[in-house]
Amino acid sequence: MSEICTKIVEEAISVQRAEMEVIKNKRGGRFAIDDVLPYVESVNKMRAAGDQSSFVIDLYVDSVNAHFLALKDLARTIPPEDEPFLERLQVPAVLEILYREDDAFRKSVRMFINAVESSRTLFGIEAMSGLGGSIGRENEPKGQTLPSGSVEQVLKSMRPMEIHEEHRLALMAASSWLLDDLQGVGDVIFKKIESGARLEDALDEGIYFVKRVFEEPAKAQIDIEDSRIIDPLSPSHLSLDVRRYIEKYSSEVEDAVKEAMKDGVHYANILSIPAFSAGSASILSQSTLNMAKDDLAMAVLEAVARVTEASLRGSADKFRSPGQLLVLAAGSSGCALEYILEMDGLSALDIIGQLRRRSTLDPQSPQKRPVSGGSSGFYHLDFVDLIYNGWRYLDNTSRKGKACTARGLPVPKVTWFDVDLSPLLDNDVLMKPQRYSNPESPHSARLSALMRLSDQPRLFNGAAISVIMANLLSTQKENAVSPADIYRSYVMGRLMGSSSDYCQYAKSA
């Protein structure tokens, strides 16, 4: 297994470095689809080793290529307003392939759809929970802790039905992408109420939405995207024909999906792998190039990526499972971000409260001129996960009086593995913020760059995490690891008094 882990380390670093090089070379310029090619070429070098399922790796690689080819065929560039929706188009396509190839799975989906109508009470609870701002509060159905007001609560209606366990977990995994985010169902109901509809009619709309999304996932997603308006004067998706994208992507990835099914890969994983791959590829975008135009922002991105690389390489011969890589990749990024804050006398604890207050999940902090989507709060939850865990690792190091390096750097441990923070000191721009602010008091220069990047936390480790996740799934193909709960915590819930430890769709039903 150690040889496989070493291979995974090199693949993750190669893909992440390819992504970072594209950002660094193109920052401040105009994004073109062809700019993604170096990243795709790096992904194409991924190979299965040992007892890994080659069909899982092939599905990941083919999905990245399918995403790239579909975009290249339909557009020269993608405007920032269209970027968030690109990673929501793969699961509907893959789900319909599963429908066509497995009648039993299709039958299970129809059983669920037929049962949705009888779940009106759950939908009502979902709507009221969202309106009351109680997302994240504690709820314990049958002894298992889940965030209240979430899609999982609605999809619990599958529990009493005689649906095959594999199919049930697959639907739970798909729901996170099909329903947009945890507020997906509630958002439909809220908008209907805001338009002046009766509560009963709004509830009907929410139920119809979920039924249609699972009955005709591709067509439903096309209609959702076609009706989405970002700017009242300009309809979204002028740059991309969503219908043609789904058709092109589906045709490119269909063979890989079928091979994964024959190989016994769990349907939950088959549905998640394309979403991970497209999400990682979509980080290369116009908005990223715009953010990276700032020298300090680029320095933060590059330094954090190098910390992850150095930490993974430093422990490459110690890993015993891909899960350990996943934990270290996320933990090392968090430690790097926390240490950047501490350079200026701050910590994660200073800014988590601010993020919670401005989050769309907090009804007490209305935005005067909102431009955020319904899922914006969850990106901040991801960022909070990173920095809070980084603070925890560093705090544990300082409390135990761990020795520092010769350069005065602490050596935090993520489980049994050391985090190498030296790339932070090696980054000349990051270490000289006075050149990008008031030379005498550059107290907020690094903070401001870091906070801008907090809107897109996947920039810090998305590529490496995505590659490691695909490799992890290839070693556990028959288990629903969607997503792996060992690296994604539920920090904001803990800080709000919840006893929830993880956010994981496959385990929430």
Image (cartoon, grey):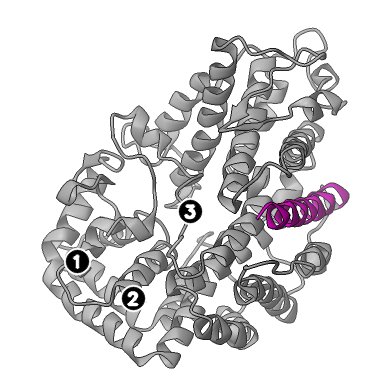
Question: Which residue occupies 65% across, 85% down?
Answer: 252
Quarter of the image for residue 439 reads: top right
Residue type pointed to by label 2: His
The picture places residue 154, in percent across and down from the top left corner, at 23, 61
Question: In front here: 353 or 339?
Answer: 339
Quarter of the image for residue 359 reads: top left
- Tell whether 272 sits left or right of 28: left
Look at the image and tell me whether residue 83 can be seen.
no
Give the labeled residue for mark 1: 159
**Residue at mark 2 to residue at mark 1: CA–CA distance:** 12 Å
- Tell whether 468 sits left or right of 233: right
User: Which one is earlier in the sequence, the residue at label 1 or at label 3?
Assistant: 1
Give the labeled residue for mark 2: 167
Residue type pointed to by label 1: Arg
Around disc 2, counting alpha carbons within 10 Å, would you say few (fewer than 14), some (14 to 19), or many (20 or more)? some
Q: Which residues are magenta?
A: 1-25
The picture places residue 324, in percent across and down from the top left corner, at 58, 45
Question: In front here: 121 or 53?
Answer: 53
Give the SS element for disc 1: loop
* Vertical side of 151 occupied by 325: above or below: above
Circles 3 and 2, Cβ within 8 Å, touching? The answer is no
Give the labeled residue for mark 3: 484
Q: Main secondary structure of the magenta part?
A: helix
